[in-house]
Amino acid sequence: MTHAPMPTPNEESTQAGFAKIYAETNPPWDIGQPQPPFIAIADQIKGPLLDCGCGTGGTSVYFAKRGLAVTGIDFVAQAIALAQAHAQGNGVHVDFLVKDAMTLSTWDKRFVSIIDSGLYHIYEAAERRRYVDGLAHVIEPGGHLYLFAFAEGPSAPGGGLTRDDIAQDFAQGWEMEAIDYAPGEINPAFEHPEMLADLKMWFAIIRRTA
Ligand SMILES: C[S@@+](CC[C@H](N)C(=O)[O-])C[C@H]1O[C@@H](n2cnc3c(N)ncnc32)[C@H](O)[C@@H]1O
């Protein structure tokens, strides 16, 4: 039996579920660089930057190479080890940490920008709210969250999110500056591209107002 190509909410969305995917597959998201919408607006993204759920570090390293101070967190140690090697191979420093994104509310770090490329959409409503509270804690007032997440649809693991789901999660103390469907790339080595053929993604820019 093959297991799901991406953890679905409350099924494999655990540290162990992701560790298994990194150990046994070519993860579909692992493209070695940022997803296209982040590259398209790279000039807007300021440091210090938090890459939340950074995986093997392609996005973090890209922005470190642009001169930003970058911190990347992920709860899978193997992904962080690969990310550190990726930074070293590119001659840049990124503060990569094994850290659970659900613990942001007790962190003493602050960031002007936060990238979430594929973490937020993994979680169901109650966990997403807890995560958003943590984002609010670590982002500077006026700072920006750049969010790339599954849109609603049959190919989206867990069914994806509607525009309203995202708007509701960020209703208090945030302003949605932009949200639209956006192109995504899939790792060419991923074993089951047909499963994601009709996948739609959101790209949102959300400003912390409080
Ligand atoms: C879909 S992958 C995206 C990885 C990376 N952002 C990218 O674009 O290549 C989601 C990542 O979030 C990490 N993750 C999921 N839940 C997490 C949590 N609670 N704390 C930290 N990392 C988490 C997973 O280990 C995985 O690396």
Image (cartoon, rainbow, N blue to C red):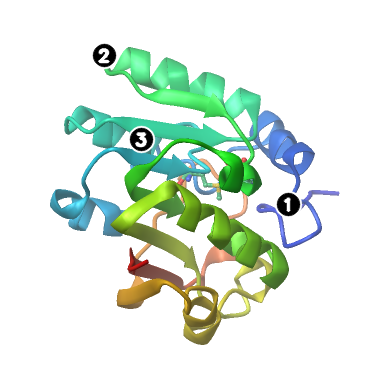
Q: Amino acid at mark 2?
A: Gly
How far apart are the alpha carbons under marks 3 and 2?
A: 13 Å
Q: Is residue 118 visible?
A: no
How many discs mark residues in the rendered view? 3
Q: Which residue is mark 2?
A: 91
| Percent x, y of residue 148 | 42, 61
Q: Which mark is residue 60?
A: 3
Q: Earlier in the sequence, mark 2 or mark 1?
A: 1
Q: Is residue 152 above or below residue 26?
A: below
Above or below: residue 126 compared with residue 63: below
Other residues around mark 3 within 10 Å, as few (<14) / some (14–19) / many (≥20): many
Q: What secondary structure is found at the residue carrying circle 1?
A: loop
Determine whether the beta carbon of the residue marked 2 sits less than 8 angstroms from the nearest atom of ligand 1.
Answer: no
Q: Between 146 and 88, which is closer to the camera in this rendering? A: 146
Q: Quadrant of residue 67?
A: top left
Q: Residue at position x 50%, y 48% from top?
A: 29
Relative horizontal placement of residue 141, taking residue 117 as reference (left or right): left
Q: Residue at x 73, y 62 (%)?
A: 9
Given residues 41 and 47, the one toward you in this image is 47
User: Which residue corresponds to mark 1?
Assistant: 13
Q: Amino acid at mark 1?
A: Ser
Question: Which of the two discs, 1 and 3, labels the residue nearer the N terminus?
Answer: 1
Q: Earlier in the sequence, mark 3 or mark 2?
A: 3
Residue 177: which disc?
A: none
Left or right position of 128 against 13: left
